[in-house]
Image (cartoon, coloured by chain):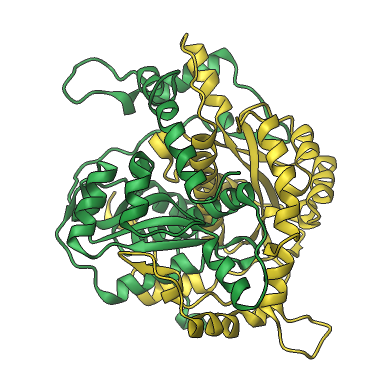
Chain colours: A green, B yellow
Amino acid sequence: MSASTLPRIPQTPSEVKAFFAAHRTARHYHPYAMPAEDLDAILYAAQHAPTDATAQLYSFVRLTDPQVREKAAELTANAHLASASETFVVCLDIHRIALLLQHGGEQAGQYPHIAVHFGIGDAALAGQNMLVAAEMLGYQGCWVGGVVNNLPELIELLQLPVGVLPYAALTIGRSAETDVPQRPRLPRQMVIHDNVYRDPTADELQAAFATMNPIAKRPDSDLPGDWLRFLRAYFGAGKAMENREPHLQAALEQQGLLK
Amino acid sequence: MSASTLPRIPQTPSEVKAFFAAHRTARHYHPYAMPAEDLDAILYAAQHAPTDATAQLYSFVRLTDPQVREKAAELTANAHLASASETFVVCLDIHRIALLLQHGGEQAGQYPHIAVHFGIGDAALAGQNMLVAAEMLGYQGCWVGGVVNNLPELIELLQLPVGVLPYAALTIGRSAETDVPQRPRLPRQMVIHDNVYRDPTADELQAAFATMNPIAKRPDSDLPGDWLRFLRAYFGAGKAMENREPHLQAALEQQGLLK
């Protein structure tokens, strides 16, 4: 690659930080048909993500049919699946590997936990490459975990065979949201450990709430945000994640991804 | 952000494609201590990746102790864990969420499959942001799935509590490899589906082998590469992935991530 064809990528640490600092999650988009060359670039980025053993244990289902989009938006309770410039359901996929082996006269192994581990990983790597490429082109996007809320219906809608499971949806478009503040992250020393895992101290846990509370602020209230309320609603005993658990387990069994 | 502080990101589709086309996996690195500002930028990028419910269900263990690096290199059978400028073990982590809830007087739910789904996803998203940031700065890197080969020993080495599991390692450095060809990917229409999942035809499966065969070429042989041999060795009945399966299952149970 000659110097003149090198992309104008960020080259200093501060430019790189500024690029990733500009990331925002967008759920409201301008009506905009993504030009073919932009679509080509983000698909190229997705497919050139790292992938375990170059096996590409993922598939994207691109939603273009308005009826399929509306239905997927309803099943995931995320209206932007219908309104985004581009909408993908990003799936782990070991079905294609089985077909390739079969085509060569070979029998596929049984490795459901490994499939989830590296299949979810491959799907996330490819999808994140796609999102970063889109952000380089001036788009914003949103990962949607809500695909796990109605998995049997979504699997049927997209006609996913055994060996394929949605990881998340990804919408991309021209953001119609303005003045969106950057969302905070946990203090670095709670997330990046040195050589061995270290539990946070009580002071650090307290500081984490102070940092993260703003994301739980209710727009209709003057009260400060309460991240604990938010965490409880998602991760507390008897709450959202625990309620999702049997549905995901059933879908994993249905798709041959759990013994 | 004023125009003068905007990062010089790729702005045309062809620049974006050229950036992602330049990605190479590197396993041999020049001895090089990563400057603090570069390390800061890649950690910043990792932490500002999208994350399900902003819950940040991941932890990175940064390996700096030469003895820990050597041991991790041995356990994963990847020598570059010891020789890279920076080496991380990228983990799913729901332990920290449990500590945060506990600190607030709340009880964490039980959601092992959901934890794996979104925890592996969050870990991969954060790690891929880190790798892309590193590539923007002129580094190359390598994701290492070999962490699953000796999980009990790696978990003990890094003192990972229940609720934490390695997804993969990630090494980053100045590549000492030259003239590395781009690794092929499956034809797009086999990976990106329109509205519904579509099985490849026999002709497409044949074309996939033609495309992918070069990655299986043995350097000591004049014979063309045989991707089927490669796929069988990894994904065939009784082969690598199936052999890894009981070990991953045991580690998931040990870490409280499987009922």
Quarter holding the C terminus of chain B is: top right
Give the side of residue B192 with respect to residue B127, left or right.
left
Q: Which residue lies furthest to the bottom in this view?
A: B222
Residue A26 in the image, given as x and y percentages of width and height = 26, 47
Asked if residue A1 shows in the view, the reply is no
Residue at 54% x, 73% y: name it. Answer: B22
In the image, residue B125 sits, relative to residue B239, either above or below, namely above
In the image, residue B33 sits, relative to residue A43, either above or below, namely above
Residue in the foreground of this view, choosing between B47 and B124: B124
Residue B218 occupies which quadrant of the picture?
bottom right
Residue in the foreground of this view, choosing between A205 and A81: A81
Give the side of residue B114 with respect to residue B196, left or right.
right
Give the side of residue B200 with respect to residue A104, left or right.
left
Residue at 53% x, 79% y: name it. Answer: B205
Residue in the foreground of this view, choosing between B144 and A70: A70
Residue in the foreground of this view, choosing between B17 and B134: B17
Residue B38 in the image, given as x and y percentages of width and height = 58, 51
Residue at 77% x, 39% y: name it. Answer: B154
Asked if residue B29 shows in the view, the reply is yes
Residue A258 in the image, given as x and y percentages of width and height = 57, 44
Residue B56 in the image, given as x and y percentages of width and height = 48, 35
Residue at 70% x, 43% y: name it. Answer: B248
